[in-house]
Image (spheres, rainbow, N blue to C red):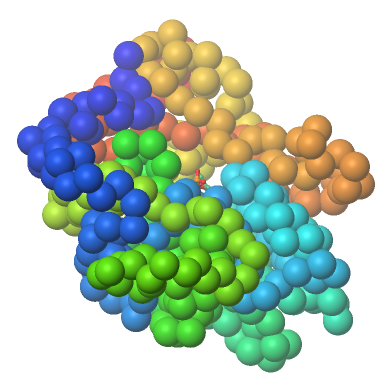
Amino acid sequence: MIPVYDRRKLYLDDKAAIDAAVARVLASGRYDWGDEVPAFEGELAAWLGAGHFVATGSGTAALKAAFRALRIGPGAEVITVANTDMANSTAIHSVGARVVWVDIDPLTRCMDPAACAAAITPRTAAILPVDMYGQPCDIRAFSKLADRHGLALIEDACLALGAEIEGQRLGRFADITCFSFSSGKHLGAMGNAGGCATQDAEVARRLRLVSGDGQDRARHRMQPRPLALHHEEESQNDRMDEIQAAVLRAKLPSLDRTLAQRRAQAARYSQALAGLVQVPAEQPGLRHAWRNYVIETPEREALARHLTAAGVQCNALYSPPMHLQPVYAGLGVTRGQLPKTEASADRLLGLPIGPHLQMADIDGVTAAMCRWKRTD
Ligand SMILES: Cc1ncc(COP(=O)(O)O)c(C=O)c1O
């Protein structure tokens, strides 16, 4: 089987460094409020070219912290897309705001700026575009819209660590850019982890506060620790664990290499599959991070059956979209209201990509795809 993910192989590839990092934390006795999280934050901010990075317990926690930090709350509307993780809608609802889903640009599968503009009302407080499958959304268009209407701009780059716009990595284009380091992401923890990049020191301070029980981290790191507790604001315990930060620090030096591997694999797929199925289009001036390689075909079910029989794992990512999930049936957004999102969700299929694979695996997938067309 050529798998979509192989987390164990990724661990074994970096075993010595990961084991040493975990052992270092275990031996230190500091599993909480230690040195690993601040060190990771500094290293990742430098890698991103962002002013500040605040580590959280997951990508979902990063999104929730972003809304709290920017004081978006009950009564506010947040515009986002439905062809994505539930985390976006969850985070919006977690602060009492209302989710407003708009349609996508079928070419990029990211939020359509025109659809976003049309959905702005006097209650809109923020725009939350998502960099789908690793391709940057049209963040400049959203930035202009946000400026014109006085809205917050939170970018969900949970699938797009290492993606670039004209040579600059994502992390400095929105008020807050959220990332996930869950185990299957570009930089994967041994479980869950995430964080937020921002250029604004006060926003970074608030992100730490709202994801750290409303406490100032500096007080926890004072020696001796002040006796009195000091909670500035009611918030969440959504910090990153020291062990996860140490693991991520151990894996960070391999990130450029694994991103290059993903790019080479995607190029190989696109070369072999163009004409057979709809291949993803990398937009000019943007560098895709290729978390997923997602093709589209009207014969998705037949292709998936063929690939599975041929020993190739594939997945239907974020399909059906959020507005058609039972949990949100009560919101009254029905099939037909987001036609481009729905058409894409019905046709898309994710193929295996990532550093757990060799180029021969990619060639194995493309060969299986070509056999499908010949036997069709
Ligand atoms: C686009 C997007 N946003 C948010 C999340 C949530 O991240 P996490 O699983 O780290 O909470 C994910 C998870 O895959 C995602 O794909």
The quarter of the picture where residue 44 lies is bottom left
Q: How many labels does the image show?
A: 0
- Identity of the residue drawn at 62% across and 76% down: 70
Is 310 in front, or is 94?
94
Is 307 in front, or is 250?
250
Identify the residue at the far front of this view. 227
The quarter of the picture where residue 94 lies is bottom right
| Residue 108 spot, x, y in % from top left | 54, 58
Is 300 in front, or is 37?
37
Q: In this view, does 124 lie to the left or right of 192?
A: right
| Residue 332 spot, x, y in % from top left | 91, 47
Tell me if residue 100 comes above or below residue 310 in the rendering.
below
| Residue 192 spot, x, y in % from top left | 42, 42
Q: Is residue 37 left or right of residue 106?
A: left
Is residue 213 visible from the viewing direction of this image? yes
- Identity of the residue drawn at 46% across and 77% down: 205
The quarter of the picture where residue 149 lies is bottom right
Is residue 103 visible from the viewing direction of this image? no
Q: Is residue 92 left or right of residue 166?
A: right
- Identity of the residue drawn at 36% across and 12% down: 311
Quarter of the image with the N terminus in it: top left
- Identity of the residue drawn at 58% across and 74% down: 232
| Residue 253 spot, x, y in % from top left | 14, 54
Q: Is residue 64 left or right of residue 208?
A: right
